[in-house]
Image (cartoon, rainbow, N blue to C red):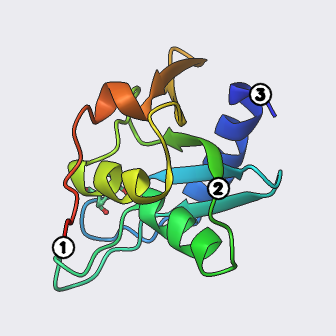
Amino acid sequence: MTGRQLIKAAKEAQAFSYSPYSGFKVGAALLCKSGKVYTGCNIENASFSATVCAERTALFKAVSEGEREFSAMAIVGNTDLCFPCGVCRQVMSEFCGKNFKIYLEENGKPVTFTLGELLPGRFDFKK
Ligand code: THU
């Protein structure tokens, strides 16, 4: 699956965005190592703080279906280069390594980052 194909899937999910408060529509598509793709959109809430980002929707859908290994995620928003927020980067880091690919779109073309580039250090819980 190419970055372009994953971005297309993210755009299809973006159409389902529930964002009556911000009007900012985000879509994400997550490629599992199994080959399956899970998509997600942002789901806002009147309380604002209960809003969930598109990236976490896709990840939680996949994890709740038994997936644990991921290779890439495409993210699209109302603007070019819609970077994942810090919370989503941390959630990605729970399951994905430094080489996990993140495809964003700029001028109609995929731009690739790695999770290691976007989150050089993660919070880790050591007992
Ligand atoms: N949003 C995402 O879906 N992903 C991000 O990484 C950052 C922000 C959503 C949350 C909210 O619905 C809207 O974008 C504006 O912040």
- The residue located at (24%, 81%) in the rendering is 50
Decide which of 86, 50 is in the foreground and name it.
86
Q: CA distance from mark 2 to mark 1?
A: 24 Å
Q: CA distance from mark 2 to mark 3?
A: 18 Å
Closer to the chain start, of discs 2 and 1, is 2
Residue 58: image x %, image y %? Answer: 56, 64
Quadrant in the picture for the C terminus = bottom left
Of tags 2 and 1, the one toward the viewer is: 1
Element type at marker 3?
loop
Q: How many marks?
A: 3
Q: Is residue 94 visible?
A: yes
- The residue located at (28%, 74%) in the rendering is 51
- The residue located at (52%, 20%) in the rendering is 112
Which residue, given by chain and number where applicable, does mark 2 sit on?
A: 69
Which residue, given by chain and number where applicable, does mark 3 sit on?
A: 2
Residue at disc 3, CB closer than 8 Å to ligand 1? no
Residue 36: image x %, image y %? Answer: 80, 57
Res. 82 image quadrant: top left
Identify residue type, mark 1: Lys
Image: 81 above or below 93: above
Residue 75: image x %, image y %? Answer: 50, 42
